[in-house]
Amino acid sequence: MYSSKTMSKILLICFTLFVSYGEGAKILGVFMYPSISHQLVFQPIWKELSLRGHQVTIITPNPLKDPSLTNLTEIDVSFTYNKPAVKNPMRYVKKEQRSLTKVRAIFDVFMELFEEEMQSAGVQELLNKKDEKFDLFIVQISHYGNVFLPFANKYNTPVVGISSLGAFLHTHDVLGNPTHPVISPDILLGLSENMSFLERLNTFLYNISYRIYYYWVLLPEADKFSRKYFGDDIPYLGELDKNLSLVMLSANPLIHPPRPNVPNIININQLNVKEKKPLPKDIQEFLDSSPEGVIYFSLGSNVRSSSLSQELRKEIIGALAELPYKVIWKWEEDHLPNQPKNVMVRKWLPQQDILGHPNVKVFFMQGGLQSIEETINNEVPLVGMPFFTDQPANLRKIEELGMGLMIDHVSLTKDKLKAALLEVAQNKKYKENVIKGKAIINDQPMKGVEKAVWWIEYVLRHNGAKHLRSAAADMSFYNYFMVDVVLFLLACVILTVYIVMKIAKTFMKKPRKLKKN
Ligand SMILES: *[C@@H]1O[C@H](CO)[C@@H](O)[C@H](O)[C@H]1NC(C)=O
Ligand SMILES: *[C@@H]1O[C@H](CO)[C@@H](O)[C@H](O)[C@H]1NC(C)=O
Ligand SMILES: *[C@@H]1O[C@H](CO)[C@@H](O)[C@H](O)[C@H]1NC(C)=O
Ligand SMILES: *[C@@H]1O[C@H](CO)[C@@H](O)[C@H](O)[C@H]1NC(C)=O
């Protein structure tokens, strides 16, 4: 009936239909935390997914707003940037606070953001769409992002969690990932691999106290928040957690200590590393005209240098003014009081392109992972002044690797800072170590967006990844720690000792009796 030509045409059409159905999934993503340095890690993922033909809907405070991305719908929750807790996180997470106090502060911020975002018009519209369907849910899993998991339940989809940092202990628990307190201490503790006795005691106790606090206090609270927006008939949040197919954690092969991971924990890195773009003219000229060298100074996006204390700022300005170099400083206000002559300030700076300029000698930074990856990629050594979360741990590692120096902002003085900047700028060993490190980081079979997107599509292809799930994830406490086995063996030992003693007693008694006779 049909000529072979039409047949093959029909086959071709069938094939393309099949392929586009097979490839183009509907994906919902929530990247909830208003912090550009974190969102910069996620943006390339949702962009790439949409370019690969998936229909992507993303709730984010940093929409790309790129009209050429026709398969992408972004629900803008950028109003969350105006929250006081987001604007000045240092007020909430103080260095000297006890770990669980910090946990509480972070949790409260996340719940507040959750509520505000759920109430926003865009999210409400999505929730009220009657026959909306999705094939996959992606969620920013760091900290307490799991409060959004009922979305996956609502749309009956598998879940992929992504973090621009590592993960808190409870996220490792969800997948049954080992969390040895000394080998893999929690990121919040900021401990190095070489711990003192007190540090080991601390991480051991935190291992236990965090879990008691999380499972008995925070998780039930988060569950209540979830119910408020998703209705009372959703399963307990702790149950929904178990539906995580994969968790992608930002783990740099150089900066993060190696840790044993179950196969559904995927390490991602360098998502933020971008192709070079030309610099704005004024910055290009400033850098070109500074053959003596330039220090690039930025505390990232979470620590605004304009919110540093007066005294600290005075010391920093004093040090920068005395340097034999020029300085580019990301300063978020119009005017910098007492601005030294060698310092240029801008509210926003194209960080990677600046670091790529050959005259940049040192990056003076706060120790954020993404900034560290960007500076290593551009072969610039660094001086770090950590404030919170993973920053102290990252910088301790940088010091160990000889890629830069760490200074403490509490005891910082003009002279200390000046000495550190001069040392890193002038001693060649720092740059050499950065170049060695770059070679290691880049030597991976798959990295960056390519790897992240491959694993997301892997979950899509198999509608979840149950086969990667470790049995440890669903085991009871006594089963995992073999409490019953240990108790049984202990009972055997006690019984044996008891019997042996009994026998010995009877044997010892006999000769005595004999003697008497
Ligand atoms: C949108 O998705 C379709 C397939 O669903 C794909 O062919 C097209 O290239 C995508 N467009 C863009 C701009 O990503
Ligand atoms: C877990 O996900 C599967 C689909 O992957 C779904 O069928 C199931 O209902 C989900 N379970 C919960 C508790 O949401
Ligand atoms: C830990 O300390 C030991 C001895 O002090 C040292 O040999 C080792 O290199 C240190 N390890 C790290 C990762 O710093
Ligand atoms: C810390 O807790 C986790 C999970 O309960 C466990 O796997 C680990 O062995 C614990 N470590 C110690 C020393 O308590």
Image (cartoon, rainbow, N blue to C red):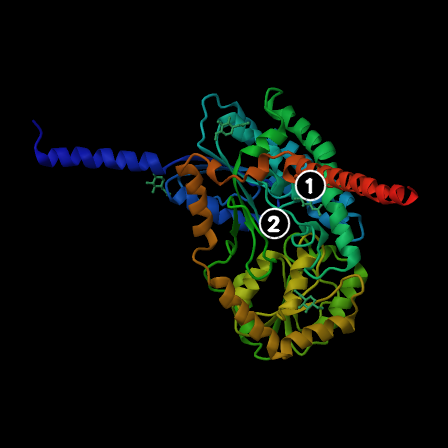
For the C terminus, which image quadrant?
top right
Assess whether mark 1 and mark 2 are in contact (beta carbons under 8 angstroms): no
For the residues carrying marks 2 and 1, which lies nearer the camera in this image? 2
Visible residue check, residue 79: yes
Which corner quadrant of the image does residue 150 belong to? top right
Q: Is the CB of mark 1 within 8 Å of ligand 2? A: no
Q: Is residue 186 above or below residue 347?
A: above
Residue 160 percent coordinates (x, y): 51, 39
Rendering quadrant holding ligand 4: top right
Front residue of 10 and 119: 10
Residue 5 percent coordinates (x, y): 10, 36
Identify the residue position indicated by label 1 in the image. Answer: 83
Residue in the image at 60% along x and 50% along y: 165
Q: Secondary structure at mark 2?
A: loop
Residue in the image at 59% along x and 59% along y: 371
For the N terminus, which image quadrant?
top left
Q: Secondary structure at mark 1?
A: loop
Relative horizontal placement of residue 29, taking residue 502 as reference (left or right): left
Identify the residue position indicated by label 2 in the image. Answer: 166
What's the residue type where badge 2 is placed?
Gly
Between the residue at mark 2 and the residue at mark 1, the CA separation in whole angstroms equals 24 Å
What's the residue type where badge 1 is placed?
Lys
Label 2 or label 1, whichever comes before in sequence order: 1
Residue 14 percent coordinates (x, y): 23, 33
Residue in the image at 33% along x and 34% along y: 21
Front residue of 345 and 514: 514
